[in-house]
Image (spheres, rainbow, N blue to C red):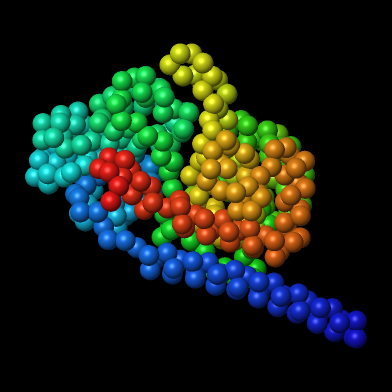
């Protein structure tokens, strides 16, 4: 009985300390959120007509985030579908800027009408470098082209695009934010994304480690794993929307980021086109106040401080070593996650991205 009481007291103290750290972490994140909201500047005095992609997930979530950010950043913003009525609405609305994130469905008549009315048009292409062949077909039709991949900017200039900028995607702090989860809802490790070949190879290489943890893997095609049966109970074989994704990141002690491979991609000259920029998951994970364990991309160090705001790995062995370390060291995990969250709220929201785009087009305020 005495031994049982000691164990209960030890468990109580451990649970109390862990709960206190978690509450402190959420409180610090909320303080940053409140501070950022108090610094909101006056909207830029322009009108923007945003034409959605007309596609499903994940573009629908990007459309919603950009549309919402525009309403906060500019004086007037309206969102329309990429159909024949968009040209009519353009003529009625007479915006200062016509913007789309994925322009393949943009009606030609709408772009012609923009040119006729001297309305600036901008394409924010979000699929580089993986679908730059599609972007090349439409980019020259726009006055301004922004790419999510730094290595693709020169390609658009070679196409004759006069105004080209590198602009990574961001995160929507309304959808991705720290939220309290119950004490029994925490998991150790999560990865959300489709099972591209390089991801399958990596997860297979650490499958025995992941199988011993409270792991969640969600996305399409994970039945491709050689170790699928070993990890089957940890896999949710479907795509998650922003709200569900944010919930998973909030549950996770460690959220994994593993970029898609870019081997075999070539630029206009037939040369290897490497991907150096990060994916949107980079910002979404940190926006939820989770510790991010990510593979390295060249642009990452320009966005976050590796080792202080995010943790990087290069090999399966390094991944396991660092994952195990931060699962055991709760204070360090929360401190790094908090710094990553603070940097994200300061620099990497869609509001910040839209403001930077407008500065490039209209000049800094």
Q: Quadrant of the N terminus?
A: bottom right
Taking the view exactly as shown, the residue that stands out farthest to the top is: 269
Residue 327 is situated, as x and y percent measured from the top left of the image, at: 73, 58
Q: Residue furthest left?
A: 92
The residue closer to the viewer here, 298 or 278, is 298
Q: 147 or 80, which is in the foreground?
A: 147
Q: Nearer the viewer, residue 31 or 1?
A: 31
Residue 123, percent from left and from top: 31, 35
- Residue 234 visible in rendering: no
Residue ID at (22%, 40%): 98
Residue 319 visible somewhere in the drawing: yes
- For residue 278, above or below residue 273: below
Number of numbered labels in the structure image: 0
Q: Is residue 66 above or below residue 139?
A: below
Q: Is residue 287 above or below residue 357?
A: below
Horizontal and vertical percent position of residue 271: 51, 16
273 lies left or right of 186: left
- Residue at image location 46% in from the left, 57% down from the top: 346
| Residue name at image x 73 percent, y 37 percent | 315
Left or right relative to 13: residue 139: left
Is 342 on the left or on the right of 316, as rendered? left
> Could you say where residue 182 lies in the image, as x and y percent from the top left?
60, 70
Q: Residue at x 13, y 35 (%)?
A: 118
């Amino acid at each position: 009985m005495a031994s049982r009481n000691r164990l209960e007291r030890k468990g109580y103290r451990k649970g109390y300390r862990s709960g206190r750290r978690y509450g402190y972490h959420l409180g610090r994140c909320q303080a940053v959120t409140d501070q950022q909201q108090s610094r909101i500047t006056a909207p830029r005095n322009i009108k923007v007509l945003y034409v959605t992609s007309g596609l499903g997930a994940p573009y629908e979530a990007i459309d919603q985030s950009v549309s919402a950010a525009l309403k906060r950043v500019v004086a007037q913003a309206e969102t329309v579908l990429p159909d024949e009525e968009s040209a009519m609405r353009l003529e009625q609305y007479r915006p200062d800027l016509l913007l789309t994130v994925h322009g393949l469905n943009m009606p030609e008549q709408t772009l012609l009408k923009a040119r006729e009315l001297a309305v600036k048009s901008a394409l924010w292409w979000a699929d580089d470098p993986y679908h730059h062949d599609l972007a090349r077909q439409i980019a020259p039709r726009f006055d301004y082209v922004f790419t999510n991949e730094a290595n693709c900017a020169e390609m658009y200039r070679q196409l004759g695009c006069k105004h080209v900028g590198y602009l990574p995607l961001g995160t929507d702090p309304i959808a991705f934010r720290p939220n309290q989860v119950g004490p029994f809802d925490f998991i150790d490790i999560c990865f959300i994304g489709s099972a591209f070949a390089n991801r399958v190879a990596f997860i297979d290489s650490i499958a025995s480690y992941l199988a011993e943890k409270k792991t969640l893997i969600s996305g399409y095609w994970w039945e491709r794993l050689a170790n699928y049966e070993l990890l089957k109970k940890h896999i949710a074989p479907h795509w998650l929307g922003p709200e569900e994704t944010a919930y998973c990141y909030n549950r996770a002690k460690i959220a994994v980021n593993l970029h898609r491979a870019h081997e075999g991609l070539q630029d206009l000259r037939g040369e290897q086109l490497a991907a150096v920029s990060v994916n949107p998951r980079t910002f979404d994970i940190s926006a939820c106040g989770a510790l991010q364990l990510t593979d390295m991309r060249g642009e990452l160090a320009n966005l976050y401080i590796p080792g202080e705001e995010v943790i990087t790995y290069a090999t399966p062995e390094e991944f396991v070593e660092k994952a195990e370390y931060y699962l055991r060291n709760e204070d360090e995990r929360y401190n790094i996650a908090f710094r990553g969250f603070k940097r994200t709220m300061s620099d990497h929201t869609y509001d910040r991205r839209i403001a930077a785009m407008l500065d490039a087009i209209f000049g800094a305020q």
